[in-house]
Amino acid sequence: MECAFYFGFCRTYRTTIAKEQIRKYQNMKHFQRNILVTTFFWLLTFGTSIGQSTSLSSSNDRQPVRPNILWVIVEDMSADFACYGQKSIETPNVDALAKNGTRFSRAFVTAPICSISRSALITGRYQTSIGAQNHRSSVPGHTIELPPNSPLVPALMRSNGYHTNNLTLEAFLKDQTELAASPKVKVAKTDYNFEWDEKTCYDDTHWSNRAAKKPFFVQIQLNGGKLRGNGNGTAWPDRVRKDLGSTTSSQSITIPPYLAADPVILEDWAQYLDTVRYTDWELGRITKRLIDSGDLQNTVIFFMTDHGISHIRNKQFLYDGGTHVPLIISGPGIASHAVREDLVEHIDLAATTLALANIDKPATMQSKNILASDYTPRRFVFAARDRADETVDLIRSVRDDRWKYIYNGFPNRPYLQPNNYKDNKPIVQAMRRLFAEGKLDQNQSLILANSRPREELYDTHADPYELNNLAQTSSGKEKLAEFRKALAEWQSQTNDLAEPESEAVYLLETIGSHPEAGRNTEDKQYQANVQLMIEWRTSKPFMK
C-alpha cells in the first residue's frame, strides 16, 4: 500500500480532526503543528492495520519478508504518557502507537542508570552476569571484556542480513538531499560498560540508503528527560514554546507524595513533563519519516525508556520510580488495542527482536521472547544498582505483580550518598534545604535518612509509591522469606557475585576516562567524594 493511499484516506477524516484540534488548541501555530502530528498518527493507525492484514509478505512475490525493526530509546523518563495514566499533559503520538500495538503496563529495567541499563539491553543479559553493573566502567587500565558467546544484538542483526544503525533523531530524519551532501552517519549514544567493536555492530551509511529489499534494524536515541538539563533554566522552556507552542504550568500538575510542593520542585516537574510532550512530538516526526520512505507498514516499532526520571528517589534507585518504564510494540504482526499486564524486563527486547528477524537466540542470552506463542510470563523481575560514577552502592530488588523486596548492602550509609551528578541538581539541593529546615513530612524525609534498613518490603497495590516498609512487620515475614529465597536463587543462577569493586579497581574506574564521559574527574567535589568513598570502606563498610 502506497503513502498516497494513506494521505487520501486521511482526507476523509480531516474535518473531524480539525474540530477536535480547535477544541484543544487555541494558539494558531500550536494548532497547525498538532494538525500535522494528528495526521501522522492517523497514518500510523491505518498503516499499521494494513500491515497486519497483509502479514509479512511482499506484494510482488508473496515470499516472506522480515520486518524492519526500530528501537526508540528515550533517556531518563518514567511512564508519564497519557496512555499510562498521566493526566497533566497530552501525548497523542505515543497514545496512537499504543492503540495500534501492544502496551506493556508492567515493564521494568534491570538497572536504573543509563550505561548499566543499556549494557544489559544490548546483550540481552543481566548486567551483573557480564561484569557491567558499575556505571561508566571499562576504562584504560581496567577494560572489561564480555564473557564468551555474548554477542550484541546489532552484531547479530547485521551478520544475519540487516542494515544496522544507531542514530540521533536528527541523523535518522535526514532526507536524500542531506545524505547526498553527507552520506555517512555516526554512531549515537551507546554507553556500554565493556569493550566492543563498532564496525561489527553498525553500518556507516543511512538506513534509507540500504540495499534493495534489505531490512533495517535501527536504534534511535532520544534525549528525553535530559532535555531539561539540571532543571529550571530558561533555554528549555524557550525551546518548548518555539516547537510546541506552549509550556506546562507548574500550577497545573500533580507531584508524587515523596516530593515537597516547593517552587523549585514544581517548576522542574513541569519542565520534565514538557520533555515528555517533546518526546511525543519527536515520535510523530519519526513516524512521518517512515511514511515518507514507504517503510512504516513493514516496520515493527519498540518504544521504551532506559529508566525512570532523573530525580531524588527515582533514577539510581530500585523503587518503581526508577525501574518502571513504558514499553510499547507496534507494527505488522503485533496485536493492536492490546494491554499486557504480565511482568517483563527490558532485556526481553533482545530475544523478541531476534525472533522477529528469524534469528536464533544465543544460548547465553537471558532475554525472553515476550511475543512467542509459548511464552511463559516471568514470576519475578529483578534489578540491581551498583556504583554510580564515584558513588559506591549495592542494592538488589525482586518484584512480582504486587510485592517489592529491596536488599541494601550498605545499610550504614545514607540513601543520598554524595554524588557529584545528583548533588548539582536544584531539585536535590531544594530537598536537602527543606529537610534541614524541618519542612518535610515523614514520607518526604525518607530518602534523606542517614541510614537505611537492611531490607525493604512494599505492597505496591496498597502503597504504589513504596513508602510504608513492611519488612519488620508480622504481616511481612512470610513474604520476606519468599523474596529472600527468590533473590538468592536468581543470584546463583545468573552469577551475580554481589560484591563491590576492590579499592584498586574502584580508583582505576573512577579516575579513568570513559569514552562517553559524563563525569568531571577534575572537579574538586568529585575528587573529595572519591576520597570519602575510600574512607567509608572502613567506617561504613559493605555488609553481605
Image (spheres, helix red, strand yellow):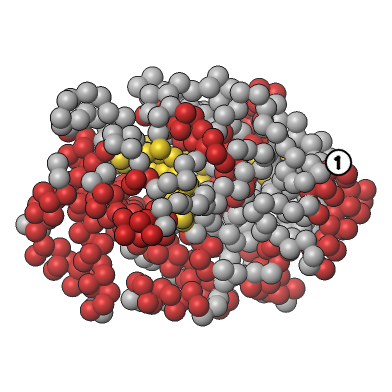
Which residue sits at x=65%, y=47%?
Answer: 469
Q: Is residue 265 left or right of residue 357?
A: right
Quadrant placement of the C terminus = top right
Which one is nearer the viewer's eye here, 159 or 26?
159
Q: Is residue 262 left or right of residue 325?
A: right
- The residue wearing badge 1 is 502
Per the image, label 1 sits on a secondary structure element best described as loop
Please, what is the three-letter code of the amino acid marked with disc 1?
Answer: Ser
Would residue 202 be visible to someone looking at this image? yes
- In this rendering, is residue 277 above or below 120? below
Residue at the far front in the pictured view: 181
Label 1: how many residues lie within 10 Å, few (<14), some (14-19) or many (20+)?
A: few
Would residue 480 be visible to someone looking at this image? no
The percent position of residue 388, horizontal first and vertical second, equals 71, 51
Q: Is residue 384 left or right of residue 275?
A: right
The percent position of residue 330, horizontal first and vertical second, equals 31, 41
